[in-house]
Amino acid sequence: MKVKLGTFPLVYPIPIVLAGAMVAGKPNYATLGDCGVMGIKPPLVYVSLNETHYTTQGILEHSTYSVNFPTTEMLAVTDYCGIVSGRDIDKAMLFESFYGELETAPMIAQCPVNLECRVVKEFTIQHRHIFIGEVVQAYVEATYLIEKEGQRGIADMTQLDPIIYALDNRYYRIGEAIGMGYQEGKIFKHTM
Ligand SMILES: Cc1cc2nc3c(=O)[nH]c(=O)nc-3n(C[C@H](O)[C@H](O)[C@H](O)COP(=O)(O)O)c2cc1C
């Protein structure tokens, strides 16, 4: 039996990211759950931010932002970035920032993976700014690179150890790999 829960965007699980932007000449970072892939080719990633956030100001100013994936070891600092505003606290002090070709999308050196994004579309829905960004470069910490069948790849999710969130307000750690995309379903092809 299905029970109605109400108008709740109960998508799960949610990867937690730190969105980076240059605000008033300084890097600033905000914790986001509202981030996701919009396409592989072209490589599109969206972020959805409240209009009042300091980070929003920076993305609007430069039309650039970064998406940084913290590890579970960074849980406390990541949560902190979601509690305090760059208006009151210098969050750049918490991390080592680096820059790519866009120069106005600060990225966090301590995060194993960083996406440098240029805004290609922006719109508002009520109090939210939704930015769709084209990934101009994806960075991975060298220690998380693997070589497989002569191809350079990225370590599996258990090693990247991302912070997972759910709308029960809890943080989680990722479990183990259980199969391969575009492969597991083939069993049906053989039996049907
Ligand atoms: C787990 C978590 C997830 C969050 N997700 C979002 C989000 O998706 N969008 C958003 O606008 N704010 C989100 N926030 C709130 C902002 O991170 C928070 O308001 C932050 O202080 C904004 O910082 P800023 O003013 O320096 O930009 C989240 C906070 C937490 C703790």
Image (cartoon, rainbow, N blue to C red):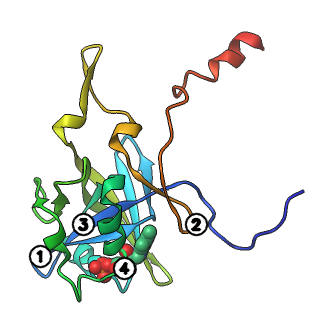
Give the residue type at disc 2.
Leu
Q: Is residue 161 left or right of residue 117?
A: right
Mark 4 Cβ and ligand 1 under 8 Å apart: yes
Expressed as whole percent of the image width and height from the top left, the position of residue 4 reads: 81, 68
Tag shown at residue 20 = 3
Expressed as whole percent of the image width and height from the top left, the position of residue 120 reads: 31, 61
* Sequence-wise first label, 1 or 2: 1
Q: Nearer the viewer, residue 52 or 44?
A: 52
Q: CA distance from mark 1 to mark 2?
A: 31 Å
* Sequence-wise first label, 3 or 2: 3
Q: Would you call the spot at circle 4 few (<14 residues within 10 Å), some (14-19), or many (20 or more)? A: few
Front tag of 4 and 3: 4
Residue placed under numbered mark 1 in the picture: 26
The answer to whether one can see residue 63 in this image is: no
Write the residue at 42% across / 46% down. Answer: 39
Expressed as whole percent of the image width and height from the top left, the position of residue 187 reads: 67, 16
* Quarter of the picture holding the C terminus: top right
Q: Secondary structure at mark 4?
A: loop
Q: Would you call the spot at circle 1 few (<14 residues within 10 Å), some (14-19), or many (20 or more)? A: some
Mark 1 Cβ and ligand 1 under 8 Å apart: no
Tag shown at residue 125 = none
Give the residue type at disc 3.
Gly
Write the residue at 60% across / 59% down. Answer: 11
